[in-house]
Image (cartoon, rainbow, N blue to C red):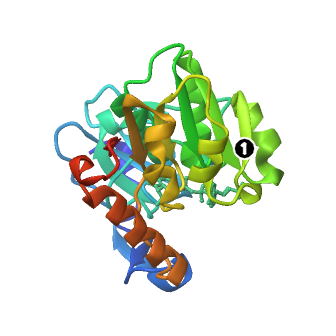
């Protein structure tokens, strides 16, 4: 055990999860959570000045013989137990934080960025193709726009009026204000792109089912509709109807008149 580790307390303050729901109801602040001082091979111990859900940014206090050393400023991703002052995790889940990026901003990157990176890999988006991103102002959408542009693709993105400048700053070539067009699917049918979209990425979660159900008209035959998760969050009537609308559009096979486009 190195000398820094000896000075680390055995107990720490941590947010524990009592149940599902909003953070104010779901989280409980405990002051006697154990610090995971016994590390497995390949793990490091990190102290976290900034707390976020799965993501973290902090400073390594025990590098445990890995490529990371005590004092390294890092950020990364942890599936479980991230809301605490100290946490142990595989060194491979961390990268060194560029010092011009504040820790609190770095801690917001991993999960959202990785989710959108994965989505774009799934869509096999190539240079010159066009992606339609629904929710360009969401955390996922903002990363997706930048990844798509880095690949040389054209980006059409939606958001509300107040976020147009943000979405364009991220790199969107075209902007659609979803609050002004009604059914997005019907709007796109009436305003067909010159070349069909190769990927439609729903970066909102649960949307108007028309975006998928009309997609044969504007999504390439070998294209793909990717959603970050069409699951109701608030169990409102609108969300439940959207969920069943989407499920129905997916359930009917193409040979029975269903939507003949890949859905992921
Ligand atoms: N964040 C993550 O790390 C992560 C990881 C995996 C999955 N997810 C899932 O991905 C979805 C998005 O999460 P997020 O964290 O990126 O959300 P977020 O940052 O909270 O996104 C909120 C944004 O969604 C936009 N929006 C809301 N309704 C819309 C609509 N009908 N059409 C277009 N845009 C709309 C709003 O834009 P305006 O303000 O412009 O109206 C708002 O800015 C959720 O289902 C979440 O569960 C998130």
Q: Residue furthest left?
A: 41
Q: Quadrant of the N terminus?
A: top left
Q: Which residue is mark 1?
A: 176
Q: Quadrant of residue 262?
A: top left
**Picture coordinates of residue 229 (x, y %)?**
40, 57
Please tell me which residue is depicted at 36% across the width and 49% down the height of the picture: 5
On screen, residue 101 versus residue 3, left or right, reads right
| Label 1 crowd bin: few (<14), some (14–19), many (20+), radius 10 Å | many
Give the residue at the far front of this rendering.
256
Q: Is residue 182 left or right of residue 51?
A: right
Q: Residue 63 versus residue 189: which sits nearer the camera?
A: 189
Ligand 1: give its quadrant: bottom right
Residue at the spot 26% in from the left edge and 58% down from the top edge:
252
Is there any visible trace of residue 106 in the rendered image? no
Viewer-proximal residue among 242 and 19? 242
- The residue lying at 31 percent from left, 53 percent from top is 258
The quarter of the picture where residue 148 lies is top right
Counting from the top left corner in percent of width and height, residue 216 is at: 43, 40
């Amino acid at each position: 055990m190195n000398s820094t580790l000896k000075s680390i307390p055995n107990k720490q303050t941590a947010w524990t999860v009592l149940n599902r729901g909003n953070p104010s109801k779901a989280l409980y602040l405990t002051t006697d959570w154990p610090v995971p001082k016994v590390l497995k091979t390949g793990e490091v111990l990190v102290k976290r000045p900034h707390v976020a859900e799965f993501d973290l940014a902090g400073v390594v206090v025990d590098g445990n013989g890995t490529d990371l050393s005590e004092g390294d400023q890092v950020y990364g991703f942890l599936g479980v137990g991230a809301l605490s002052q100290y946490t142990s995790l595989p060194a491979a889940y961390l990268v060194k934080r560029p010092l011009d990026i504040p820790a609190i901003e770095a801690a917001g990157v991993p999960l959202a960025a990785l989710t959108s990176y994965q989505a774009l890999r799934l869509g096999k988006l190539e240079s010159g193709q066009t992606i339609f991103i629904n929710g360009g102002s969401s955390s996922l959408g903002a990363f997706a726009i930048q990844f798509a542009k880095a690949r040389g693709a054209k980006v059409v993105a939606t958001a509300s009026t107040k976020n147009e400048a943000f979405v364009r700053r991220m790199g969107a070539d075209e902007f659609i204000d979803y609050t002004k067009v009604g059914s997005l699917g019907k709007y796109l049918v009436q305003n067909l792109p010159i070349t069909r979209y190769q990927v439609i990425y729903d970066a909102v979660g649960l949307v108007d089912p028309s975006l998928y159900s009309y997609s044969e008209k504007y999504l390439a035959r070998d294209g793909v509709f990717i959603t970050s998760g069409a699951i109701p969050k608030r169990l409102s009537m609108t969300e439940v109807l959207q969920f069943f609308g989407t499920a129905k559009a997916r359930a009917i096979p193409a040979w029975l008149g269903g939507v003949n486009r890949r859905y992921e």
